[in-house]
Image (cartoon, rainbow, N blue to C red):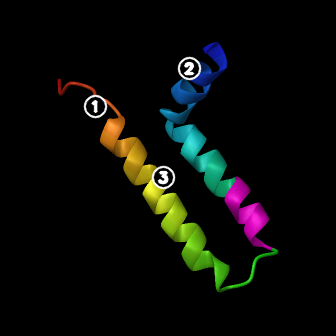
Amino acid sequence: MKPLNYLLARLKEPSSYRGLAILAGLVGVSLEPGQWNAIAAAVAGAIGLIEVFRKEKPAK
């Protein structure tokens, strides 16, 4: 279970989102324009799901 906890901890960091966006951009070079809608929907759904379950830091 430790690898899963490590992965989830890394996904909470903003740098992980930037890294995933860069990797998606590299992969996207070879994709057809019609596939971008499906990718955008999948990414939006994944981020939405993460945001539903992510704890917010208390306001200071």
Q: Relative to 10, is 46 on the left or the right?
A: left
Q: CA distance from mark 2 to mark 3?
A: 18 Å
Report the quarter where the N terminus lies. Answer: top right
Taking 27 as reference, is 32 above or below it? below
* Residue at the far front in the pictured view: 1
Give the mark nearest the N terminus, 3 or 1. 3
- Using the rendered view, name the quadrant where residue 24 is placed: bottom right
Q: In what element is the residue under mark 3?
A: helix
Q: In what element is the residue under mark 2?
A: helix
Q: Residue at x 65, y 79 (%)?
A: 35
- Reading the image, the residue beneath label 2 is 5
Mark number, residue 46: 3
Query: Which secondary structure type mostly characterizes the magenta part of the structure?
Result: helix
Write the start and end of the magenta stretch as one range. Answer: 23-29
Mark number, residue 56: 1
Q: Relative to 27, is 43 on the left or the right?
A: left
Q: Amino acid at mark 1?
A: Glu
Q: CA distance from mark 3 to mark 1?
A: 17 Å
Give the mark nearest the N terminus, 2 or 3. 2
Q: Position of residue 58 (x, y in %)?
A: 21, 24
